[in-house]
Image (spheres, rainbow, N blue to C red):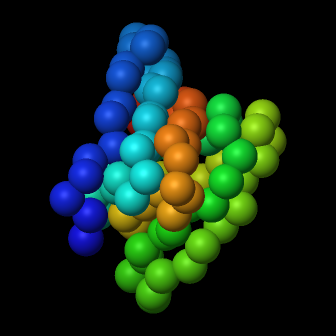
Amino acid sequence: MSEIKAVPTVMIEDERVRVTEWRFAPGAATGYHVHEHDYVVVPITAGTLRLVEPDGTRDTELAVGVPYNRPRGVAHDVINANDYEFAFIEIELLENR
C-alpha cells in the first residue's frame, strides 16, 4: 500500500453529479475504497494505472480523452504505476443518493 496519496479536487458538486480531478504523483494511490455511485473516468494523461481489486492486482493502460464507466459497488485501490504524474477526471452520477 502506497504512503503517497492521490490528490482529489472536487470541481463540481450538486444533487446530480460530482466531478473530481484526481492527480497522482508517481506511486501515489487513492487507498482502497468502494464506489457508492455509478461513475465515468476521463483520463487527462496517458499511462498505466495499477488496480488492487478483491480478486488480485492488474495493470490497465489509459489513453488521453478515452473515457470508461463503471457501476457503483466497484472496490479497489488505484495506484499510479508510471514514473510521472498521472491525472483523470471522475464524474460520479449521484441520482441514487
Q: Residue at point 44% right, 35% down?
A: 22
Q: Is residue 78 left or right of residue 58?
A: left
Q: Is residue 57 left or right of residue 88?
A: left
Query: Based on the displayed image, in which of its 4 quarters is residue 7 positioned?
Result: top left
Residue 44 position within the rendered picture, expressed as x and y whole percent measured from the top left? 66, 33
Foreground residue, 66 or 34?
A: 66
Q: Residue at point 71% right, 46% down?
A: 46
Residue 37 position within the rendered picture, expressed as x and y whole percent measured from the top left? 44, 43
Residue 19 position within the rendered picture, expressed as x and y whole percent measured from the top left? 49, 23
Q: Residue at point 56% right, 31% down?
A: 89
Q: Is residue 72 left or right of residue 62?
A: left
Foreground residue, 79 or 11?
A: 79
Q: Residue at point 44% right, 14% down?
A: 11
Foreground residue, 5 or 96?
A: 5
State the quadrant of the C terminus: top left
Query: Based on the displayed image, in which of its 4 quarters is residue 73 positioned?
Result: bottom left
Q: Is residue 66 left or right of residue 2?
A: right
Residue 50 position within the rendered picture, expressed as x and y whole percent measured from the top left? 51, 68
Residue at the front extreme, as displayed: 83
Residue 26 makes an appearance in the image: yes
Residue 35 makes an appearance in the image: no
State the quadrant of the N terminus: bottom left
Residue 87 in the image: above or below residue 56:
above
